[in-house]
Image: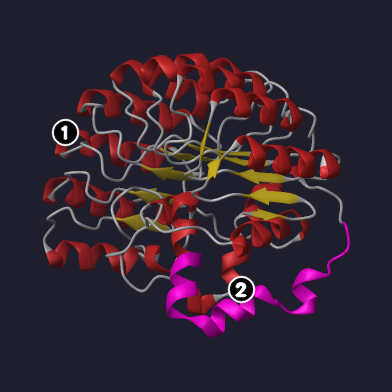
């Protein structure tokens, strides 16, 4: 359990009444400056969570909230989360990965999520969604009135959504003018969605990262992608086609035009594919993103982040120590004016500095539930 001066990170713990009381006391002490709270893979009673949520509602500065991995295990907790979101008006990153939310749960959450005008990144991967959730997903990624629409959405491992449902989502991506990071990995798209995938890439000039790992697409879809890549000016920078049974020659041809540096681009989703604990450094580094003026690469999902730091802790102690003691010029930055267009980029910047922590293979992936 890590309770810092401006954030809280609790990983894989049972929050007993005693522990909950201690956490509540700490939240009360930093309520005016807390920016992030993570309760990844934790368990807590409905009654204690209600006490915790009442205090979190007073923390108006929270921008990052993580309830990943079976935290929301009752309808009561789902209702408490819904109520909590209504008070966190500055929230820009919400992680709900691997909770059995289902379609009915997304309906309950939808109104609160859609009213978060600053929300840029949403992780609802592995939430047991079906085609009934498709219209809600489309509404979240598309601009509506004063809301600009999401910049990143993680939909990994929602395998009950059919190719028909994905086709409708991809049609929505065409009009999602602000969507930069789209994670569809470990789903059932197949080649029937190939034309709509290429259409989305052509029509959405904001799209920079598309994760199609293990989605059932084949050579036919990649041939369409190659045609588009060769003949159209695209903004796409990362295209993950791993584990799809595609001919090696076709995959290599794609790499000539779009560098597939997914292994070197840690993102929220990449972290999800790993199944190890997140360390304190993840939140500490994420906290610096709002102070950096330089645009950085996005983290597709917080799940992958978790894996990166755990892997660093086990395999690269020297790098891990470097993360614990970053250089002064990277930490002691003065307050700067907030820039709405740059803030999201900055949030996912921090891993860029630590090149030696990048994944070298995709055998161990983050934010989804296969091992990165």
- Tags 1 and 2 touching, CB below 8 Å: no
Considering the whole magenta stretch, tell me its main secondary structure.
helix
The reply to whether the magenta stretch includes residue 313 is: yes
- Please name the residue shown 22% across and 36% down the image: 189
- Pointer 1 or 2: first along the chain: 1
In the rendered image, residue 246, in percent from the top left (x then y), is placed at 14, 57
Assign a secondary structure to mark 2: helix
- Please name the residue shown 52% across and 54% down the image: 299
* 141 displayed left or right of 19: left
The reply to whether the magenta stretch includes residue 258 is: no
- Please name the residue shown 79% across and 33% down the image: 60
* 264 displayed left or right of 246: right
Q: Which residue is mark 1?
A: 192
* 144 displayed left or right of 214: right
**What quarter of the picture does the N terminus occupy?**
bottom right
Assign a secondary structure to mark 1: helix
Residue 297 or residue 316, whichever sits in front = 316
Residue 137 or residue 102, whichever sits in front = 102
- Please name the residue shown 35% across and 55% down the image: 239
In the rendered image, residue 271, in percent from the top left (x then y), is placed at 44, 56
- Find residue 353 and name its label: 2
**Residue 67 visible in the displayed image:** yes
In the rendered image, residue 358, in percent from the top left (x then y), is placed at 45, 72
**Residue 117 visible in the displayed image:** no
* 341 displayed left or right of 248: right
Mark 1–mark 2 Cα distance, whole angstroms, equals 40 Å
- Find residue 177 and name its label: none
Q: Is residue 318 above or below residue 302?
A: below
Q: Image quadrant of residue 172? A: top left
Instruction: Report the residue that reaches farthest toward the front.
Output: 18
Residue 90 or residue 336, whichever sits in front = 90
Q: Where are the magenta residues, as a range?
A: 309-335
């Amino acid at each position: 359990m890590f309770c810092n001066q401006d954030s809280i990170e609790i990983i894989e713990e049972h929050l007993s009444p005693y522990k909950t009381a201690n956490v509540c006391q700490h939240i009360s002490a930093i309520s005016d400056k807390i920016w992030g709270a993570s309760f990844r893979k934790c368990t807590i009673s409905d009654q204690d969570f209600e006490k915790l949520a009442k205090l979190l509602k007073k923390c108006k500065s929270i921008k990052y909230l993580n309830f990943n991995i079976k935290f929301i295990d009752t309808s009561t907790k789902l209702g408490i989360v819904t109520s909590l979101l209504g008070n966190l008006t500055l929230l820009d990153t919400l992680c709900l990965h691997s909770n059995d939310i289902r379609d009915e749960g997304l309906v309950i959450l939808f109104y609160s999520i859609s009213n978060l005008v600053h929300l840029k990144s949403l992780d609802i991967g592995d939430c047991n969604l079906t085609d009934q959730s498709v219209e809600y997903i489309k509404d979240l990624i598309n601009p509506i009135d004063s809301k600009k629409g999401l910049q990143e959405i993680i939909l990994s491992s929602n395998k009950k959504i059919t190719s028909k449902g994905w086709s409708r989502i991809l049609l929505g991506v065409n009009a999602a003018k602000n969507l930069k990071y789209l994670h569809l990995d470990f789903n059932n798209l197949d080649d029937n969605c190939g034309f709509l995938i290429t259409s989305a890439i052509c029509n959405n000039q904001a799209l920079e990262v598309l994760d199609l790992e293990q989605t059932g697409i084949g050579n036919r879809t990649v041939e369409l992608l190659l045609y588009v890549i060769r003949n159209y000016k695209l903004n796409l920078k990362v295209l993950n086609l791993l584990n799809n049974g595609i001919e090696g020659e076709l995959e290599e041809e794609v790499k000539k035009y779009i560098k597939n540096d997914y292994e070197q681009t840690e993102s929220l989703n990449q972290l999800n594919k790993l199944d190890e604990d997140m360390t304190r450094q993840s939140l500490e580094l994420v906290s610096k993103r709002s102070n950096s003026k330089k645009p950085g690469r996005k983290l597709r999902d917080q799940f992958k982040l978790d894996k990166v730091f755990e892997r660093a802790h086990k395999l690269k102690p020297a790098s891990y120590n470097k993360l614990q003691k970053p250089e002064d010029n990277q930490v002691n930055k003065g307050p700067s004016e907030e820039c709405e267009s740059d803030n999201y980029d900055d949030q996912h910047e921090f891993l860029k500095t630590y090149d030696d922590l990048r994944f070298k293979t995709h055998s161990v992936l983050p934010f989804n539930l296969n091992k990165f």
